[in-house]
Image: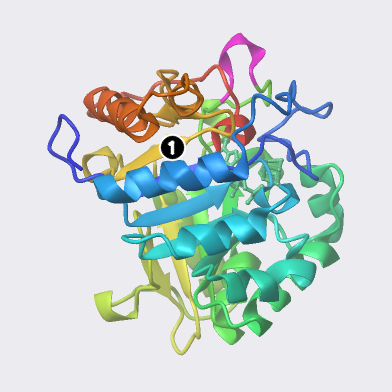
């Protein structure tokens, strides 16, 4: 699939639910967001059907996200269905990890290829503060469960928010003794307009990847520890995507920097997003959405797959060339599928 700017689109991110067992301060307001009704949400069979159609159009990789994808009933069966869809080469997931101790083995057995776990701090009190209802132990146990189930690579995603004062060096050093790939993500202005998320993003809270790399290395020097060095292409973790990777000498894992703001990677964008309520979004930063759900639930006798293909074609035709530093979207990250 090519979009109107000639980019190959072969990656679909699917939000399975807008619900979550956390309320991370940069993602959701304390009281949560207005939840979609049961009928609004795509059924598991509908999601599997969209994936079949997308695979026929050239999608090769699928990532399941949310909200928290592991709270969605039927997620293991969906992974199994997607993994055996002809044309799909890998199916991965982004999760807060809480339910991995219960589910990691089943997910692995069902064919999940890779898992990214979100974790922003190693300080138990700060973890409680950021997630509003989480317990650091649960996410750490989730990471252990993912490693024990044989997931490789296991990536740890941390959003850097200046006012949180996270200990970036301690975090980066998680990659030293374990085969963990730590990635720092720039804080993005998603979900601010119309009070969509109300999470209080401001440019002063963004720590650019370049600044962050400088801070990690400065703190490492101050403690007499070695600095990060760029990773050779051969050692990059599978599915490395738009991150730039570094490593500490002799480390088992790597440290990546994802810079959607400071280093636009829109020119290399290869993705579309499907929201939990069945809207195809050409760009994370744009409120333009294309309605797959109506196509899926079309009248009897209509060619549903053809209707879904037409929605994909419309979304491809509408993909912007870049995000143009847009600030704010109507729906928050947990609703769009971060
Ligand atoms: N609940 C799952 C989790 O937390 O991994 C999946 C959904 S969550 C929305 C996906 C990712 O988006 C998480 O890594 C989260 O930290 C990140 N995220 C949420 N809001 C963000 C923002 N404003 N800027 C950058 N990343 C954000
Ligand atoms: Fe939930 Fe993930 Fe958003 Fe945190 S970042 S509130 S875990 S969806």
Percent across and percent down for residue 252 are 50, 85
The N terminus - image quarter? top left
SS type, badge 1? strand
Above-or-below relation of 13 to 197: below
Q: Residue at x 79, y 60 (%)?
A: 123
115 left or right, relative to 272? right
Name the residue beneath numbered marker 1. 273
**Residue reaching furthest left?**
6
Reply above or below: 111 against 261: below
Q: Quadrant of the C terminus?
A: top right
The answer to whether residue 276 is magenta is no
Which range of residues does the magenta coloring cover? 191-196
- Does 63 sit above or below residue 253? above
Residue sitting at x 22%, y 28%:
321
Q: State the image coordinates of residue 69 (x, y, percent, origin top left).
A: 65, 49
Q: Quadrant of residue 322?
A: top left
Q: What residue lies at 71% left-to-right and 47% top-to-bottom?
A: 72
The residue located at (57%, 25%) in the rendering is: 202
In front here: 178 or 92? 92
Q: Quadrant of ligand 2?
A: top right
Q: How many marks?
A: 1
Residue 118 sits above or below residue 225 on the image:
above
**What is the residue that sits farthest to the bottom in this orientation?**
250
Crowd band around label 1 with a 10 angstrom C-alpha radius: few (<14), some (14–19), many (20+): many
Q: Would residue 195 be counted in the magenta stretch?
A: yes
Q: Front-most of 8 and 89?
A: 89
Q: Is residue 295 left or right of residue 109?
A: left
């Amino acid at each position: 699939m090519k979009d109107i700017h000639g980019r190959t689109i072969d990656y679909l991110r699917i939000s399975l639910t807008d619900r979550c067992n956390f309320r991370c301060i940069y993602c959701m307001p304390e009281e949560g967001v207005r939840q979609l009704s049961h009928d609004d949400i795509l059924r598991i069979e509908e999601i599997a059907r969209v994936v079949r159609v997308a695979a026929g159009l050239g999608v090769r990789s699928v990532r399941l996200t949310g909200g928290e994808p592991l709270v969605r009933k039927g997620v293991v069966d969906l992974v199994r269905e997607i993994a055996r869809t002809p044309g799909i080469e890998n199916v991965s997931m982004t999760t807060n990890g809480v339910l991995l101790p219960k589910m990691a083995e089943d997910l692995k057995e069902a064919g999940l290829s890779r898992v990214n776990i979100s974790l922003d701090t190693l300080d138990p009190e700060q973890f409680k503060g950021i997630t509003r209802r989480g317990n650091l132990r649960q996410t750490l146990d989730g990471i252990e469960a993912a490693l024990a189930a044989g997931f490789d690579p296991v990536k740890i995603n941390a959003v850097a928010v200046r006012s949180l004062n996270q200990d970036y060096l301690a975090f980066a050093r998680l990659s030293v003794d374990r085969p963990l790939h730590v990635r720092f993500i720039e804080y993005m202005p998603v979900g601010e307009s119309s009070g969509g998320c109300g999470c209080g993003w401001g440019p002063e809270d963004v720590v650019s990847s370049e600044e962050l790399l400088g801070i990690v290395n400065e703190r490492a020097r101050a403690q007499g520890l070695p600095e990060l060095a760029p990773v050779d292409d051969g050692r990059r973790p599978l599915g490395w995507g738009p991150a730039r990777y570094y490593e500490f000498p002799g480390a088992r894992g790597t440290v990546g920097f994802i810079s959607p703001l400071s280093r636009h990677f829109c020119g290399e964008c290869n993705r579309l997003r499907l929201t939990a309520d069945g809207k195809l979004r050409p760009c994370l930063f744009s409120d333009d959405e294309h309605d797959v759900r109506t196509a899926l639930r079309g009248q009897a006798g209509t060619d549903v797959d053809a209707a879904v293909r037409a929605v994909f074609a419309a979304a491809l035709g509408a993909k912007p060339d870049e995000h143009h530093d847009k600030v704010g979207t109507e729906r928050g990250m947990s609703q769009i599928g971060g």
